[in-house]
Structure formats: structure tokens, C-alpha cells
Image (cartoon, helix red, strand yellow):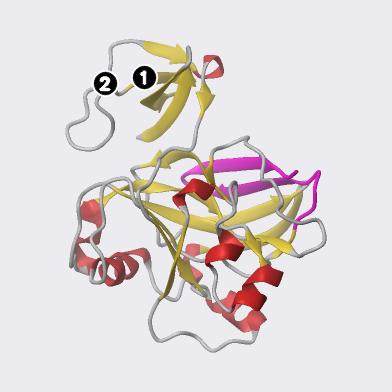
Amino acid sequence: MKIVRFAHDGAEHWGFLEDDRVRALPNGPFGEVEPSPDSLPLDAVRLLAPVKPGKLVCVGLNYVLHARESGLALPDEPMLFMCSPQAIIGPGEAIILDSHEQRVEFEAELAIVIGKRARNVSAAEAASVVLGYTCANDVSNRDLQLKDKQFTRAKSFDTYKPIGPFIETDLNPESQTIRLLQNGVVRQDSTTADMIFPTSFIIEFVSSIMTLEPGDVIITGTPSGVGPMKSGDRIEIEISGIGKLENPVQ
């Protein structure tokens, strides 16, 4: 199932895609799912960020080739940091650069959307607390990241976390291609099999530290090939089994 959030007639709704139509989920996707009998053409609605999380948990340095291109040793355990959920935007919305002089980079990532309250969940049970997966762009101001020696400010500007276009509930997250195109040119081209820590272990690790709630999002690191963006660019992130997230840069 492809779960969406969408705007129609001045209101926001949950729904899911059926070919080129959207069927509403009046009670949302958490718990018992009860679809509406009515549907709308996809081109009659505006897709929003597919979830509004209470927490946005991020994993750094989680792809082997990205670690190598950065000249860094592979970590012994996931490197976690938090970003502001207010940074999240949806498909088609503009990434607004905080600076035209500083280096702001794209990072294609697979995002996990939590579906059930989770605390101390084992890797073997991790799939049971996942609602689904979506595409994410972990936009980062590298100059501020180096200056601050930590990531919160550099990655938490409003619009710096595009996600979408929808949540795919039926996906094997460990064997998907992940690509990023900048103005039609491929910049990142990898597979989630290059992850140092798979999604199941990430959920185990994070849930051993903090309780995860329905709707929380974990972004899982970026592959090699990160690079700078400029105003006027169009960034596309494609993950097999999910789809394409597109955002202009301003």
C-alpha cells in the first residue's frame, strides 16, 4: 500500500493510492485502517509530506562507500543525531537555501516511518513496528556543520528535510537501489545493501535509547556522491519500490 497525506478543498487528509486515484483513510494509517468508499483523481489533490513526525532521528555515516570517500573509519555502532521535524517538506515544495555563499549539500536517504509505539524492540521484531518507508533528502550546510562540530543547526533549517512522495508499506528495505539526480544528472547511485547497519538493527538500536511513537521518522544515512546545490536546481531522489521525490531549490 502507498500511503499519502494530501490537501483537498482546504483540508489535509490521509489516504492511499489506487492507480491514479486517492482513497481517503478517515482514521489515518495507524491502527485499524478503514478506507473511505470515495476516491479522488490524483491530479485533483496536492500531495503533502506523507507524515508529520514527533521525532526526526538521523543516522550518520551508514554507507561503506560514503565512509571511504569521506576518509573516515567505519563506525562500530550507529551514529545518531536529531533534526527538527519542522524542517520537513513534501514533494514539489522548494528547498530554501539558508545561504548562497556557504556549501549546502544534498543527501539521498531511505526513511523509516514508525507505525507502532516501540521500546527495546529486537532486530528480529523490528519490521512489526514499521508502517513503511519513503524517500528523504538530508540537506546539510557543511560550513555550519564544520563550525559547530555537530549537526543540529546545519541540518535543521526549515525546508531542509524533504520526504515523500508516499509511504510504501510493502518493501524489503535491504535491497533497493537509491539514486539522486541533480538537474537530470545522476550524482548518487547505490543500493541499500551498502548500508553498514541495516534498518532492522537501526530500529533495535534507536528503540533501546528512546521510545518511538507512531509517525516518528528515522533517516538512515546517505551513499557516496553527496554534492553542493544551488538556487535553480531540481533534485530528484529515486528509491526502487518506493518512487521519486522531486524538489526545486531556491
Image disc number at residue 23: 1
- Relative to residue 240, is residue 121 drawn left or right? left
Image disc number at residue 123: none
In the picture, the quarter occupied by the N terminus is top left
- Above or below: residue 18 compared with residue 29: above
- Above or below: residue 43 compared with residue 193: above
Asked if one can make out residue 240 in the rendered structure from this viewpoint, the answer is no
For marks 2 and 1 on the same chain, the one whose residue lies earlier in the sequence: 1
187 or 103, nearer to the observer: 103
What residue lies at 70% left-to-right and 54% top-to-bottom? Answer: 98
Q: Is residue 69 magenta?
A: no
What residue lies at 45% left-to-right and 84% top-to-bottom? Answer: 75
Q: Amino acid at mark 2?
A: Pro
What residue lies at 75% left-to-right and 65% top-to-bottom? Answer: 103
Mark 2, Cα crowd under 10 Å, few <14 / some 14-19 / many 20+, is some
What is the magenta range?
229-250
Rendering coords of residue 178 (x, y %): 56, 57
Query: Of all residues shown, which one is farthest toward the bottom?
Result: 73
Rendering coords of residue 8 (x, y %): 47, 16
Mark 1, Cα crowd under 10 Å, few <14 / some 14-19 / many 20+, is many
Rendering coords of residue 200 (x, y %): 30, 65
243 or 246, nearer to the observer: 246
- Above or below: residue 170 compared with residue 143: above
Rendering coords of residue 82 (x, y %): 44, 64
- Relative to residue 169, is residue 12 drawn left or right? right
Image disc number at residue 35: 2
- Above or below: residue 86 compared with residue 93: below
The answer to whether marks 2 and 1 mark residues whose Cβ atoms lie closer than 8 Å is yes
- Relative to residue 219, is residue 151 drawn left or right? right
Q: Secondary structure at mark 1?
A: strand
Q: Secondary structure at mark 2?
A: loop
